Amino acid sequence: MHGLGNDYIIIDNRDGKISDAKAAELTKTLCERHFSVGADGLLLVCNSTVAEAKMRIFNADGSEAEMCGNGIRCFAKYCFENSIVSKREFAIETLSGIRHVWLTLKNKEVAAVKVDMGEPNWERSSLPMKRKGTAIDADLDVDGEKFKVTCLSMGNPHCIIFVDCVGCFPVEEVGSKIENHKAFPKRTNVGFVEVLSENELNVRVWERGCGETLACGTGTCAAVAAANKLGKVGNKVTVHVLGGNLQVEIAKSIFLSGAAEKVYEGTLFKEP
């Protein structure tokens, strides 16, 4: 499945057949695009005692992520269309807490999903990021080059940089350096943002553990939150990512809306 090109393999693991010890290595094998299925990550459907289902997220490199905005839309569509959940509004447990989703149906299939992404946390400790306090429009030295960064957690860590032209910016070079910067002990996602108007942004995201993706839900929300915090945009924003458009609304929480698509399904008949 994919959300605007940010693609995931989804497996129903409510029987616990894929153990914790096996999940990371299986993810790395299945997500390799040349010799296997290929994806940005693996999502496991697990049982939950506090929500209708639990989502575990593994990046392509096998590391486990706390939250994923595009992944959770795919996850919600999968759960509904496979009769794991029968409601159009339900809760999903993640490592970053409970997330509520609302489904838009078309011919009994899920056409779009709205997600309550929660409130951003601006404290450095939430990412984590070294030093105390916040990092809002702060200086970050990257191999001798200084960048103005705004850092926050959307359940997972994000470092946002505003640029004049995202299409011209060396996202891979700078993104990789900041992902692994000593300021972020557990690494970070990096968002590069171009402000088009008070309700429109262009965004590219270098994702921790998998590189640049065609879309990043939490990264999109982090970009809008940072832009709003700095007075660059209002409360309702259309975000253009490489894979398409996402809608973000800032209220008490941040709400993310966008499509989710099923590409194909198959059977893993022999474990790698």
Image (cartoon, helix red, strand yellow):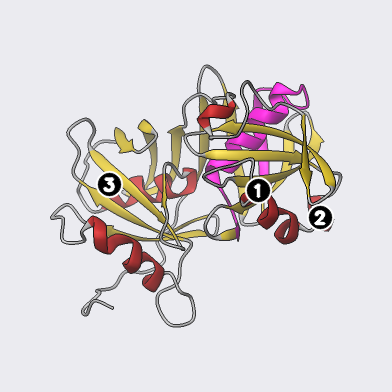
- Residue 9 higher or lower than 35, as above or below: above
Mark 1 to mark 3 CA distance (whole Å): 40 Å
Q: Secondary structure at mark 1?
A: loop
Please identify, in this view, whether the residue under mark 2 or under mark 1 is nearer the observer.
1
Q: Which residue is located at x 42 percent, y 55 percent?
A: 63
Q: Which residues are magenta?
A: 212-240
Residue pointed to by mark 2: 169
Mark 2: amino acid: Phe
The residue most toward the bottom is 35
Q: Secondary structure at mark 2?
A: loop
- Residue 249 higher or lower than 36, as above or below: above
Quadrant housing residue 134:
top right
Residue pointed to by mark 3: 80
* Residue 89 coordinates in the image, percent (x, y): 32, 32
Q: Which residue is located at x 30 percent, y 36 percent?
A: 93
The quadrant of the picture occupied by the N terminus is bottom left
Which of the two labelled residues, at mark 2 and mark 1, occupies the earlier sequence position? 2
The residue most toward the left is 15
Viewer can see residue 107: no
Tell whether label 3 touches label 1 (CB within 8 Å).
no
Report if residue 225 lies within the magenta region. yes
Label drawn at residue 181: 1
Q: Secondary structure at mark 3?
A: helix
Foreground residue, 205 or 235?
A: 205
Which of the two labelled residues, at mark 1 and mark 3, occupies the earlier sequence position? 3
Foreground residue, 113 or 270?
A: 270
